[in-house]
Image (tube, helix red, strand yellow):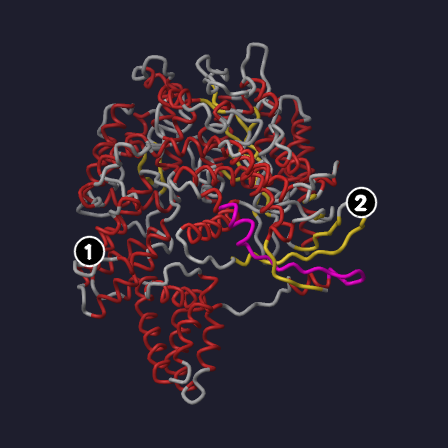
Amino acid sequence: MRAQEITFLKLVQGDKQFQVPLYQRTYSWGREQLQRLWEDVGELVDQHLSGDTAAPHFLGSVVLAPGQIQAGGVQRWLVVDGQQRLTTLMLAFTALRDHLKDHGETRAADRVHRQILVNEFHEGLDHYRLLPTQADRDAYTACVTSRPQAGGGDNVGAAYRFFRGALTEGHEATADQRWVGAVENALKDLLSIVEITAESGDNVYRIFESINNTGVGLSQSDLLRNYVFMLLPRRGERIYRELWLPMQQSLGPKNLELLVWLDLVVRGHHKTKQSEIYREQQKRLQPLAGDEDALQREIAQLAERGQRFLRIVEPQRETSLPLRTALERLMAWGGQVHYPLALHLLDLVDAGTTTPDDAAEALLFVESYLVRRLICQTPTAGINRIMMEAPKELETDRTAAEAVRRFLSGKRRRWPGDEELLAAIRSKPFYWSGRPPQRSYILRRLEESYRPTEPVDFAKASLSVEHVLPQRPAQAWFDLLADEAEEGQSPQELHDLLVHTLGNLTLTGDNSKLSNHPFQRKQQILDSSALRMNLEIASSERWGKAEIMARADRLAERATILWPGPVGGVKPAAAEEWAGWAQLRAALVAMPSGTWTTYGDIAELIGSHPVPVGSYLGSNSSVIGAHRVLTAEGKISAAFRWPEGSDRQPPRDLLEGEGVRFDPSGRAHRTQRLTAAELATLLGKDVLEGAAEDPLPDNENTAAAERFRNQLQEHCPEAVPGLLAALDFWRAQGGHLRYGQHEETSCFTMLDAGTTHTPNLMWPFAIYPISGTVEVVFQYLKHRAPFDDTEQRRELLSRLNKIDGIELPEAKLELRPSFPVRVFAGHSDAVCDVLDWFVHAVALDLARRG
């Protein structure tokens, strides 16, 4: 066996092929792992462009075993371990090649293709430097060979689309012409891999087991502790007992690790990654070796900082009421992004160089910065870096609050001013912003701004976000909206532009009672609410566009007071592009091949209107995926034109090549359309519509079941016998039913597929009786074994598609495609066969996992 550290370029160069054995699992990296890798690449690129010496980033190891060598052929290597890293990097290079090609850099694109992706002088399967498992092979080779199907709905396609989007966004965000070249350099030469190659006869699987053993490794703080106390031969035992052990016990392992990292950040080492804590602290402390007095002071300072950090994660420890309130609000907001700045401010308070009130005001500006960016849907990229830079960059000749406000108001730090905030509240789909707790937090703070004489105890109240204008409205709502729709705008399009905006959202504990009732019924329920904002809504005579916009303006006025803006109320520069267009481009790149969307869906997603969306794409038709945006009827717009001189195929030919079907009248097939909610999901937004993680309490299930049956009987009477028979069959197989809180009484076919130690609740279907649809929830199944394997989801899709009336596009293997409830009218037995297969597939996986 031989091991060496090597760059990715040196690993893959030459006439060689890396073969993933057919028995290995399919490619499984998701957005979280891809984002982490891209952030690491971004740091290497920044260092390179700033002239700093960029140390290689260690990516991990690959274990290779020699395969057959054919005369005149390629050297084959079996990938025993590391296929996820290899596949990811190959897909990153595929996206880079296509990005270069789109920007006219044909020679650079050709270089990447020949140097990394293929064995230039070999044909057939030997042509590919990486050969994934058979399950992933078509999707991967479609990307490498630039076939129209590249970027499909599986994990391989999703990774390719992720890198296409990341490259597009990164290129748009920088004015440096060297940026793309720096990305290529980082991917080729600055990602370090340990190549472990076995000799013939070596037991490669024993090597694999030793690398992936189940032992718990030492944490960064463990390594630091061992190093420090090695330097304290005389005082070590006493210092450990008096300082280190109490700190370790009060913080716990995870918070101690965070503290050791934050200690570096607030000292000015803001580029330090959490994986590099030990190395950086060792470098800082090494000059003190032999000076036990100095080392003792260092540990004492860390322990003191640990007590301050406890006040951040447990704000009730803070004695100053204003400062405690500010810390509590940031903890309620969630996340750790504020930790470096909060710790620095507590350092200043305890040193006597600022007051608790001043630190509290500074933290209010941090809260405002986070809230305003979320409401305006400002991209989150770089926000961690900004907060980590703050302790070092704050001006010291001003109060802490003023210094923080001025720092966050910097031109490139994108703190939205009042004008931008108002526009976002009126038009952006707030319900898709941030995470659910953050959306609830903003509504809670707005409610508290009414200063009621008997405030609600939010800690005890069970409240959820309610759409006053429902997500799935009955016809009476559309009749109301028809009076306010603009010329050429349908009531449905107006509904979609309004429904998720902040002006239409409130908090309530009566979500299931409110449902999609007419406004008059909602008024009666809201009028008995303890929340002032609900009483205000109930006082309206009707609820349409005018009322939603008026409420948006009132909430915006409150928001500007609650969350003060940047110094001078910074406005985007006149030449600065509106952020919605960047989101439009990201959405089009994220679309799997074989799908299409409409101008209205894009408008709903970005908080605009179909007309300006059409105008933008009309003048920027070179945008990747522009041909996938069609009219509301699913037709190619008569105004669509490729840029002059383009040799691209007509849009319909391109779409058909990607797998989109058209009827004789030129309409694209409706099942292949991506709605605004589906686009938001692909962009990583937390879209909760109809999610089964928010079921009704078990004690309300009986009444909910009756409501579900009544709604089903009213709206889909012909499907009632077949659907109820299928639900009985599901229960007989060991499943159970749950009913959702959202608008109409949805029904979820639940199955507990977990072990004693590992819960694994899953559900194949979500059934909506009023809209008459059955969602197949691939979006959730992809995170649950065995359907985290793309092939298992594809098999489920294939079995369902054999039933008349069901047409689920393969491009939606990450989403929630649907079929009509009426299928149960004539094919209930066939659906039951699929459910039976589903239960057996889960049982087999459960048996395998023990």
Which residue occupies the foreground of this view, 579 or 538?
Answer: 579
Earlier-in-chain disc, 2 versus 1:
2
Q: Are marks 2 and 1 in contact (CB under 8 Å)?
A: no
Residue type, label 2: Gly
Which residue is nearer to you in this view: 106 or 329?
106
Which residue, given by chain and number where applicable, does mark 2 sit on? 72
Q: State which region is magenta.
A: 183-205
| Horizontal relation, residue 739 to residue 128: left or right | left
* Amino acid beneath label 1: Ala
User: Could you say where residue 348 lies in the image, as x and y percent from the top left?
Assistant: 23, 66
Q: Quadrant of the C terminus?
A: bottom right
Q: Which residue lies furthest to the top in this view?
A: 665
475 vs 149, left or right, is: left
Give 94 or 447, whichever is nearer the viewer: 94
When the figure is inspected, residue 39 is found, relative to residue 350, above or below; the finding is above
Figure quadrant of the N terminus: bottom right
Magenta-drawn stretch contains 436: no
Relative horizontal placement of residue 13, taking residue 712 as reference (left or right)? right
Residue visible at 44% across and 43% down in the picture: 178
Rendered view: 575 above or below 226: above
Q: Can residue 280 be seen in this view?
A: yes
Position of 30 relative to 768 (above/below):
below
Q: Residue 401 carries which label?
A: 1
Task: Calculate the distance from the C-alpha at mark 2 to the C-alpha at mark 1.
Answer: 70 Å
Q: Is mark 1 on a helix, strand or loop?
A: helix
- Residue under the point 65% across and 49% down: 12
- Up the image or down, 670 lies above or below 276; here it is above
Q: Residue at x 16, y 58 (%)?
A: 398
